[in-house]
Amino acid sequence: MRMAVKVLPCLLLLTLCSQLKGAEVIVGIWNHGTLVEQNGWITVNRSEAVTLDCRVDGAEEEEELVWYRERMRVNLPPHNKLNSSSVCINPISDADHLVTFSCHLKRDELVNASVQLNVQFAPLLAGSEEVRVEKGNEVSLTCDVYSNPRPAVSWSKNNSSLDIGLHCQLIQDGREARLHISKAQPYHQGEYKCEATNSHGSYSKTFQLHVDDKSNRVPFEPIIAAVVVAVLTISMAFVSRIRRIAKCCKKGDLTSTGQ
């Protein structure tokens, strides 16, 4: 009985030590051999590749690891799960910007580490575009300036700084920069350039804007509608006439039979 009393505290102490050791298991994410700060982020360029390594520290037995891209679990081969695991994103795209990758212990997903990708990329600006508008109508010249870091955007006309005049408005949100002309006039005609600059360089797109005089176009839509109505009217009249003739013929047949 006394032996059992002495053994019981020892068992409790061993259990406590075991729990403490389990609590010391740490999961970390490495990038290029450098430990990423918990809930940190790394900067990568679009079209490059990045490999994230996850390792277990303090485990007495083999631990299985799982990866998530946001809330979606990443499929891993069996040899890439125990004690250390890697995911490779190749190539990095705009869609990976601000995406979080996290690595967890399978038996206790509260033990984890995560990293957010800060994807850097240039604006998607290139080439030229021909734009035609009729005098008095509205027109918009649109540039895709979505990039990271956010670019500085400038407009020019005929290689000179753009002077925002009557009926002109510059609009810019996170993804697009637009030059909107509410009532196009002949003096709006010319070559416009949209230029976006960030740490990846300067990129531009040109527009050749042509303002055409109003043409005396025949309104085909009302004419087509009138023709359709006329054809239907004639067709209905013709069908009605045929029915009357048919009725008359039937009456004539009956009269002839009665004689």
Image (cartoon, rainbow, N blue to C red):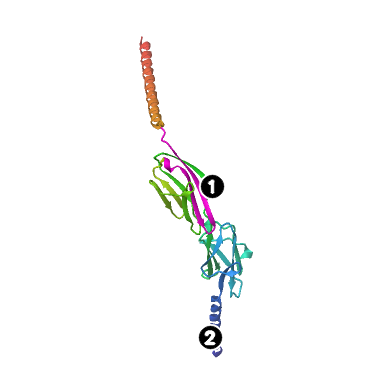
Give amino acid for label 1: Gly
Instruction: Pinpoint residue 90: horizontal percent, then vertical percent.
Output: 59, 58
For residue 222, side relative to residue 99 (left or right): left
Q: Where is 38 relative to 249, above or below? A: below
Q: Tell me where the magenta segment starts and ends, as one range.
A: 186-215
Predominant secondary structure, magenta span: strand
Examine the rendered structure and indicate whether residue 239 appears above or below residue 51: above
Residue 163 locus on image (x, y percent): 42, 49
Q: Residue at x 53, y 53 (%)?
A: 203
Q: What's the residue at 53%, 76% (across, down)?
A: 23
Residue 81 visible in the picture:
no
| Rendering coords of residue 165 (x, y %) | 39, 47
Does residue 199 show up magenta in the picture? yes
Quadrant of image for the N terminus: bottom right
Residue at the farthest top position:
259
**In this view of the protein, can residue 84 be seen by the observer?**
yes
In the depicted view, which residue is nearer to us: 145 or 238?
A: 145
Which residue is under mark 1?
A: 127
* Secondary structure of the residue carrying numbered label 2: helix
Amino acid at dot 2:
Pro
Q: Quadrant of residue 29?
A: bottom right
The quadrant in which the C terminus is found is top left
Question: Residue 51 in the image: x percent, y percent?
Answer: 60, 63
Check the image and name the residue furthest to the front.
160
**Image check: 35 left or right of 220?**
right
Q: Would you name the residue on which mark 2 appears?
A: 9
Residue 185 falls left or right of residue 30: left
75 or 99, which lies in front? 99
